Image: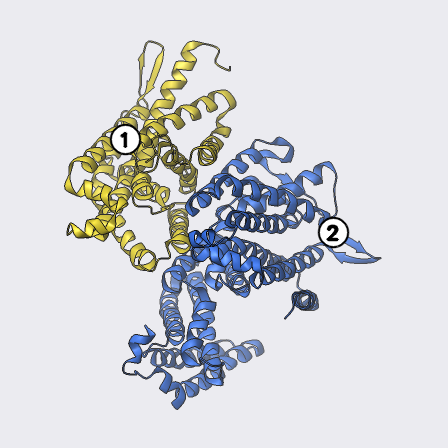
Amino acid sequence: MRTPVFLAVALATALLVFALTRAIGNDYLFFAGYIVIQFIVLSTAWNILGGYCGYVNFGTAAFFALGAYTSVFFHKTYPLPIPVLLAVAAGVSGLVGLGTGYLTLRLRGAFFSIATLAMAVVLQTFVVNWNYVGGSRGAYVIRPNELDVFGYPIDYIQYLFLIMILLAAVALTIARAIEHSKLGYGFATIRDDELAAEASGVPTLKLKLIATTLSGALMGMAGAPFPYYIGYVEPASTFGLPYAVNSIAMPLIGGTTVWFGPLIGSILLGTLTQIATVTISSAVNLLLVGALLVGFVIVAPSGLVGLIQQFLRVASPARPDARSIGLIALAAFGFVVGVLEVVFSLAALTAPDSTELATATAGLVLAALWIVSAYGLMTVQGWSPIIATLAFALSIPIAALHIWLDRTQFNIALWGACIVIAIVAIAFLRRRRVQQLYAPRLGEQEALA
Amino acid sequence: MCFSSADLLINALVAGLLLGGFYAAVTVGISVSFGILDIVNIAHPGFIIVGSYIAYIVNAQFGLDPVLVGVLALPAFYALGAITYQVYYVSFEKRGQEALRGLAFFFGLLFITEVVLILVFGVDYRYVSAPYIDKTVSLGFVQFPMRMVVPCLVSLAMLALLQLFLGRTFNGRAIMAVAQDQQALRLMAVDPIKIKRMAFALSIATCALAGACLIIIQPVEPSVGREYIGRVFAICVLGGLGSLPGTLIGAMLLGIVESFTSTCAGPSWAPAVAFGLLLLTLAVRPAGLLGR
């Protein structure tokens, strides 16, 4: 697909999501959705430097906060409309990215990462000591209730949501365009072997500076509407570590080499953290992100996209067939159910009355079963169909129990669907062609490993 | 200048030197892991905070002296370091992925220790009690607060022992050698992985003592570690990677600069000093003062 066509499709998808969210008509959806989409922009921006060039930026929060504080500054001096603020923030953050890159990118990669951490603290200290933008007390930014667009009033949160989702579409288009351009191939050579790239005439420093500037500018743009969204910004949370961790974890969990890796990662992890924040607490939700990050870099270093690509290479090298697509769907279902199960079990564990200890422990065991079987299915392990069948079989009585306990229409539909999926899945796993794929084959096992 | 009198200047200088001595204890682990082994362990401050909390728990429960607790915790931290290195080696170094994913791994570790400590202990400041913490010795007009002197002495002792170990023993020399040529080490019938594991474990073991020193100097809460990321790397780079005397000089320099900044511009500017110094060193002389 050509880039202009892709941009049109991405923008149309963004507008469609916006219209759908509006049709549901729940204000909370806009609040939660804004955060998830903001992370799509942040992780895509991080991935341009981190995933494509292989340079780890720990300073996402700093670039983000630069954008946010640009907005605060202009809000106090001369209020500007948000699209203009986006452009200004992009300029400021892009320049800071260029400066940091210029100082440190000539050195080994690790120095750049440490310098970005350093930059975050320097900037935070400046903001803390700068009274005009609120200092350590923070600053209030009162947003208007509504915005008038051609005589048609629109809720301000919805307006911010719309801006952010359009920005996400643009960011994804940029990332995709880079991937298939000369620039992207240059980035890939830097990631794979910088010395060899330099020796064969790739202008590595110039390319790295382009990546840092672009990535920084996008992060700044993600931060610019933030003060209007949250209403109150203060340095400690705006420069907080969670931004850095999330924007690193999302691409690494999704997959760093393709544009839709960060997208998958941020939708998955963003939604998960929103659920965990509501059902448990924000501290546990951060723990979950950290654990997922460490778990993924150890067990599945190329992320979800990498896992699926590897699986397809083994299961259907020519083109995806029904069997492999079915198995991927099963594994995806198992993974999502497993992770959700962890969240809800933890919620039960941390509830004030821990009478649900037994259910929570059982839930955690079941969750482990789901996740292990999903991982096994994707890495073509001989034991995985048995474990997956076990997980699906166990889910049938549990779903039945849920229906029996609470016979609302919604519950019956939800858990009924689970039972149907489980039966179909078990039947699918019993098929000969699926069994064949997982049967031990002499000689080929070593080749796979 | 903001120093109205000579004794204010000398007091700031002494405070800076004592602070620098303590910074050397915090940094020496990074000098071994980052400087010698080339492992970018940004989770190091996280381990230090864990050391602080262990000192706090034992001190609050049994009233043991924090430094003694630090010494007793050394073997446990050594084991922790060995395990961490084993995971790091198997998952990243062996696969050649330490650049991107290894960094993310340590960043995740730092984050996890912080969040777990917050979940268990909350965000309240914790402190220890020992007979010498409130005492101050005065020599003329110069003040020596004991809560700074004790960590400084502990730190100097630790640095001296490590320097002796690295320079005089077989294993110590092997650690210095592994940074230069792994293959040569193999030819001498020494397993480089074993040596690296030992070195990394040692670097984490220093966290037990550094953590105990930290909680003597200041009350500790889980996110204090973040302020030290910049400091340890600034000192490590400033002094020259992998050089223990360089580490001490860098630490003293940073201590003095920070102490002067606190006196002149106010303590809220102090965190920026370390990072500013780091950025400056990286831009001007990345090899550091005593660089290889």
Which residue is rendered at x = 53% and y = 41% of the image?
A: A102
Category of crowding for the residue at label 1, using alpha-carbon neighbours closer than 10 angstroms: few (below 14), some (14–19), many (at least 20): many
Q: Is residue A418 visible?
A: yes
Q: Nearer the viewer, residue B87 or A105?
A: A105
Q: What chain is tagged by disc 2?
A: A
Q: Which mark is residue A445?
A: none
- Tell me if residue A178 comes above or below residue B144 in the rendering: below
* Chain B visual colour: yellow
- Tell me if residue B186 comes above or below residue A395 in the rendering: above
- Tell whether label 2 touches label 1 (CB within 8 Å): no
Quadrant including the N terminus of chain A: bottom right
**Residue A297 drawn at (x, y percent):** 40, 59
The amino acid sitting under disc 2 is Asn
Which residue is rendered at x = 51% and y = 76% of the image?
A: A406
Marks 1 and 2 on same chain? no
The reply, left or right, for residue A166 in relation to residue A190 is: right
Dot 1: what SS?
helix
* Chain A visual colour: blue
**Residue A265 drawn at (x, y percent):** 51, 63
Which residue bears the numbered disc 2? Answer: A145
Which residue bears the numbered disc 1? Answer: B155
**Residue A80 drawn at (x, y percent):** 74, 44
- Whole-number angstrom distance, CA of label 1 to CA of label 2: 58 Å
The image's colouring method is by chain
